[in-house]
Every structure is written in structure tokens, then in C-alpha cells.
Image (cartoon, rainbow, N blue to C red):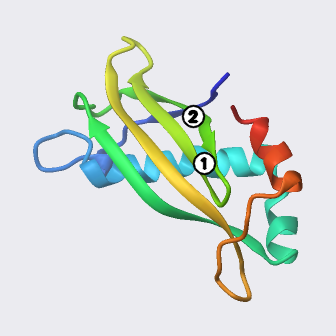
Amino acid sequence: MPDIIHIKVRGYHLDVYGHVNNTRYLEFLEEARWTIKEKYFDFPQTHDEGFGFVVVNTNINYRHYAELGDVLEIRTHLSRIGAKSATFKHEIVNAATEQPIADAEVTFVIIELNSGKAIPIEKKWRDRLELLK
């Protein structure tokens, strides 16, 4: 079951054509992931323990434009857990019409903050990540 957040399109999200600027969608996806981190992980504690989540790849498909006042629903779930990386699947739809706006896959790793190196996704991380499927 995906985690869902809503974002209302504001004037500062728009480009000169009156549509949400393509780079803003990356921010919307990041907001969805931060919401998940807060919900499923004690992010300050994770950081204090010396670990962080780092995006290593983003693939996004723009399906339709969004305009001022639209409420966007961002649906997020974990689609894959590998040995050292995992992938979130995001779907952005117009909440009122269900019109697909964009979809994306965002791959991340867990790093040790001291070394900056990705670590294997061991049981303690895997168990928490499985909750996001």
C-alpha cells in the first residue's frame, strides 16, 4: 500500500508557461520521501548513529502538466530492495481527476556518514524497508 501525501500547486511552482516547472516535481518527490523517513525511521537517531540515505539515480516521466491550484497526490512505495540499494516508485496524479501527472523511480543507498560509502542493506535496514512495499 503506498504512502500518500498531497501538495497544492502554488505560484512559485510554475514556469513561464503557467505549468509546474519540471524541477519542482523532484522537490515534490523529495517531500514524499522525507515524509516516509519521518514516519518509518527515527531520522535524527539514524543520523546520530552515523547513517544517511542518499539518492543515486532518478528516472522521471512527465505525463501531463499541472497548474496553479491543482492538488497533486504523490503515491510512494518501495518497489525493490537489493544488496546495496533500494528503489522507490512514485506516482503523481491530480487528486481531483486522477489524471496521471508524472511517475518516477528513485534509487537510493544507505551510507556511513564518516566514510561516505554505501553499506550493504542488512536485516535491520531491510526489515524497516519492507514496511514500505
SS assignment at label 2: strand
Q: Which residue is rendered at x = 72% and y = 70% of the image?
A: 119
**Furthest residue to the front?**
83
Q: Amino acid at mark 1?
A: Arg
Please give the residue where the numbered disc 2 appears in the rendered image: 76
Left or right relative to 72: residue 88? right
Mark 2 to mark 1 CA distance (whole Å): 8 Å
Q: Position of residue 29 (x, y in %)?
A: 48, 46
Residue 33: give its label: 1
Q: Could you say which quadrant of the image residue 66 lies in?
A: top left
Q: Residue furthest top?
A: 97
**Mark 1: which secondary structure?**
helix
Relative to residue 131, is residue 79 drawn left or right?
Answer: left
Indicate the position of residue 56 as horizontal and vertical percent values. 48, 64
Asked which quadrant contains residue 45, the reply is bottom right
Amino acid marked by disc 2: Thr
Q: Residue 131: percent from the left, percent from the top?
A: 79, 35
User: What residue do we see at 49% from left, 36% from top?
Assistant: 90
Q: Could you tell me which residue is drawn at 60 percent across and 40 percent down?
A: 80
Judge left or right: residue 34 versus residue 91: right
Q: Earlier in the sequence, mark 2 or mark 1?
A: 1
Q: Is residue 106 above or below residue 18?
A: below
Task: Point out the residue furthest to the bottom here.
Answer: 114
Callout 2 touching callout 1 (CB < 8 Å): yes
Q: Which mark is residue 128?
A: none
User: Measured along the vertical axis of the image, is residue 2 above or below residue 52?
Assistant: above
Please identify the quarter of the rendering in which residue 113 is found.
bottom right
